[in-house]
Image (spheres, rainbow, N blue to C red):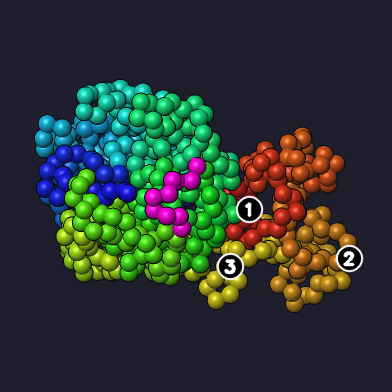
């Protein structure tokens, strides 16, 4: 049987440093800021004005307000902030100018400022209680446990902090060491290039490269075989350097001991070193061994966040789904579909607590979510902030209020409650009603909407999963070229002046994008057609050969595919394939257009 342990250090009010894995940042791409972040026992939120508010536990200055006293209500810390990430006891924020600021627990270098600190709360607690600037040119950041990872705007990945489990991905190296924390790195070190997103877990991390490949390293968390791995005496697997795990990945989130990845088709895949509380969502028994490789759990997923022992995912329709540990009400649902035994110590049995082993819907209208150690923060599309879970040090931000206590008399909030006085920054156009804030295509679709390339398919909806037609894709391309007026007459037998695509159709004929007397506006648009149109608009440049096994050398779209790959417009669909006949959704078309015209 599995045992469940409380954090005795927290329960007794002792300052012993980080002990429990905390939040992983859950952005899908480096340009997708995180408006809310749930950490070990503290929370950060960026409001609609770009102000950063913090609340919860503060024993090492992780709130950044110059004190070490916890706060039951939000306190303002910084201005001009676009993104925040909370670790177990440290915090990072990116300002609008791309500068990275950090504060909190720094005994193992997690702040990244060379190990400097301004307060020492004990022999082992070196703390930075006010924000300090660490670096410039940062696109995204992820904190967890007592280490940090950041992606710069040039795509380079940098890591620092604790490295006892090789979670920095640099082979276990560091510039400092002591008997309590082992090897650690007090300054950022470069680990990878061409990175789009990163997520730090309990003692493992993962990064998505620009080509859609997922790379993983550290302690347990996902099955990667024995590539470059070492096996210490404990018999657990460590991965000292990044190793490739999956293709066609758009976003990743690492939890306490599990990992979730969203593929470019919207499917959610998970894996982990254990499944004690059903956090993998595979409906297996609680004591079952965790899967040995990533497996699919959900479809149409826009965003995911892994907490300490639970998982939350936002679908493309804005619905929020949760599963895993629910002892502290972190799922926001009543009970669960299974129970596991609870121990306060190895032998003191207290009873059992609920878990949810399969995804269950919690609410609609959600923009983003963040799972902490034993609680969850939710931002709806209207910017309202909701919270549920453990609340013994005010990590929910509602003044310490709760509606129940757990089996260990810990105050908990078992249903989501709305925080008053705060509205989160939701990085979407006001009318983007049916597009989740962190979908893998959100930035691209947002650009297309703001540029007037794509408009609503209905009342304030954009139908990102809708398959595009020939008429639609050519209209988008026409708009991207500033909607030029036709210079010739109508050559098509199936196009009328009243059709929305009338001018686009005539323009496409003039540019040689289509031919013949039939336009076929309702014919589904394929991947090969899309890249061929983009290639022709670029002047049909020579690009050599491609290596895809499903693109014959003599195909009329072969050179267009090779060109699209060379320009970074596509990387294929995995396993050395391009899938030329596969249809394209509106979200995918927006991605193609963004990569061609905006980058």
Asked which secondary structure carries label 1, the reply is helix
Asked which secondary structure carries label 3, the reply is loop
262 left or right of 570? left
Between residue 81 and residue 379, name the one nearer to us: 379
Q: Quadrant of residue 457?
A: bottom right
Q: Do the residues labelled 3 and 1 touch (CB within 8 Å)?
A: no
Residue marked by disc 1? 593
* Numbered range of the magenta stretch: 283-292
Residue count near mark 2 (Cα–Cα under 10 Å), binned few <14, some 14–19, many ≥20: few
Q: Distance between the residues labelled 3 and 2?
A: 30 Å
Q: Which mark identifies residue 64?
A: none
Between residue 364 and residue 217, name the one nearer to us: 217
User: Tag count in the figure?
Assistant: 3
Q: How far apart are marks 1 and 2 (CA)?
A: 27 Å
Residue marked by disc 2? 517
- Residue 143 in the image: state x and y as whole percent: 33, 42
Q: Which mark identifies residue 463?
A: 3
Q: How far apart are marks 3 and 1 (CA)?
A: 17 Å
Does the segment drawn in magenta span residue 290? yes
Residue count near mark 3 (Cα–Cα under 10 Å), binned few <14, some 14–19, many ≥20: many
Residue drawn at x 74%, y 37% as measured from the top left: 546
Image height of 433 relative to 71, above or below = below
476 left or right of 251? right
Residue drawn at x 34%, y 41% as measured from the top left: 202
Q: Main secondary structure of the magenta part?
A: loop
Residue count near mark 1 (Cα–Cα under 10 Å), binned few <14, some 14–19, many ≥20: many
Residue 299 showing in the rendered view: yes
- Residue 196 in the image: state x and y as whole percent: 50, 42
Does the segment drawn in magenta span residue 156? no
Label 3 or label 2, whichever comes before in sequence order: 3
């Amino acid at each position: 049987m599995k045992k469940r342990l409380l954090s005795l250090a927290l329960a007794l009010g002792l300052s012993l440093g980080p002990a429990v894995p905390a939040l992983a940042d859950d952005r899908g791409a480096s340009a997708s800021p995180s408006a809310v972040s749930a950490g070990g026992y503290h929370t950060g939120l960026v409001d609609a004005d770009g102000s950063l508010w913090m609340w919860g536990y503060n024993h090492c200055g992780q709130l950044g307000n110059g004190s070490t006293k916890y706060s039951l209500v939000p306190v303002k810390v910084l201005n001009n902030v676009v993104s925040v990430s909370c670790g177990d006891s440290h915090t990072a924020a990116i300002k609008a100018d791309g500068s990275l600021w950090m504060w909190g627990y720094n005994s193992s270098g997690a702040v990244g400022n060379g190990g400097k600190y301004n307060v020492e709360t004990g022999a082992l607690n070196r703390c930075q209680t006010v924000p300090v600037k660490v670096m410039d040119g940062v696109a995204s950041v992820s904190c967890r446990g007592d280490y940090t990872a950041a992606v710069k705007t040039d795509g380079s990945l940098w890591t620092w902090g604790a490295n006892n489990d090789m979670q920095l991905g640099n082979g276990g190296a560091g510039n400092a060491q002591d008997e309590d924390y082992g090897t650690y790195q007090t300054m950022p070190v470069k680990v990878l290039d061409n990175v789009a997103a990163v997520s730090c877990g309990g003692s493992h991390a993962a990064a998505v490269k620009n080509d859609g490949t997922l790379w993983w390293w550290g302690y347990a968390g996902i099955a990667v075989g024995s590539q470059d791995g070492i096996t210490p005496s404990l018999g657990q697997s460590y991965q000292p350097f990044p190793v490739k795990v999956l293709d066609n990945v758009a976003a990743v989130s690492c939890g306490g001991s599990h990992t979730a990845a969203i593929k470019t088709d919207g499917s959610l895949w998970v894996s982990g070193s254990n499944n004690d509380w059903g956090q993998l969502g595979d409906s297996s028994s609680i004591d079952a061994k965790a899967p040995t490789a990533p497996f699919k759990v959900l479809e149409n997923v826009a965003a995911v966040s892994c907490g300490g022992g639970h998982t939350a995912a936002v679908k493309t329709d804005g619905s929020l789904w949760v599963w895993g540990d629910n002892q502290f009400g972190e799922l926001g649902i009543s009970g669960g579909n299974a129970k596991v035994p609870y121990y306060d110590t190895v032998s003191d049995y207290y009873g059992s607590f609920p878990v949810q082993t399969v995804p269950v819907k919690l609410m609609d209208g959600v923009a983003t979510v963040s799972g902490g150690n034993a609680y969850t923060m939710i931002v709806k599309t209207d910017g309202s902030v909701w919270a549920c879970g453990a609340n013994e040090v005010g990590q929910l931000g509602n003044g310490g209020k709760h509606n129940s206590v757990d089996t260990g008399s810990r105050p908990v909030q078992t249903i989501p409650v709305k925080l008053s006085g705060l509205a989160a920054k939701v990085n979407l156009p006001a009318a983007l009603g049916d597009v989740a804030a962190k979908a893998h295509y959100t930035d691209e679709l947002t650009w297309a909407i703001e540029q007037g390339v794509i408009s609503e398919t209905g009342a304030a909806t954009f139908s990102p999963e809708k398959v595009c037609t020939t008429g639609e894709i050519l209209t988008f391309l026409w708009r991207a070229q500033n909607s030029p007026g036709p210079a010739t007459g109508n050559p098509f037998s199936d196009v009328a002046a009243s059709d929305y695509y009338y001018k686009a159709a005539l323009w496409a004929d003039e540019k040689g994008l289509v031919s013949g007397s039939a336009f076929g506006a309702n014919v589904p648009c394929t991947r090969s057609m899309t890249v061929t149109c983009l290639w022709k608009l670029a002047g049909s440049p020579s690009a050599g050969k491609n290596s895809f096994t499903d693109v014959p050398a003599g195909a009329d779209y072969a050179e267009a595919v090779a060109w699209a790959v060379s320009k970074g417009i596509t990387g294929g669909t995995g396993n050395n394939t391009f899938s030329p006949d596969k249809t394209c959704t509106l979200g995918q078309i927006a991605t193609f257009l963004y990569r061609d015209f905006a980058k």
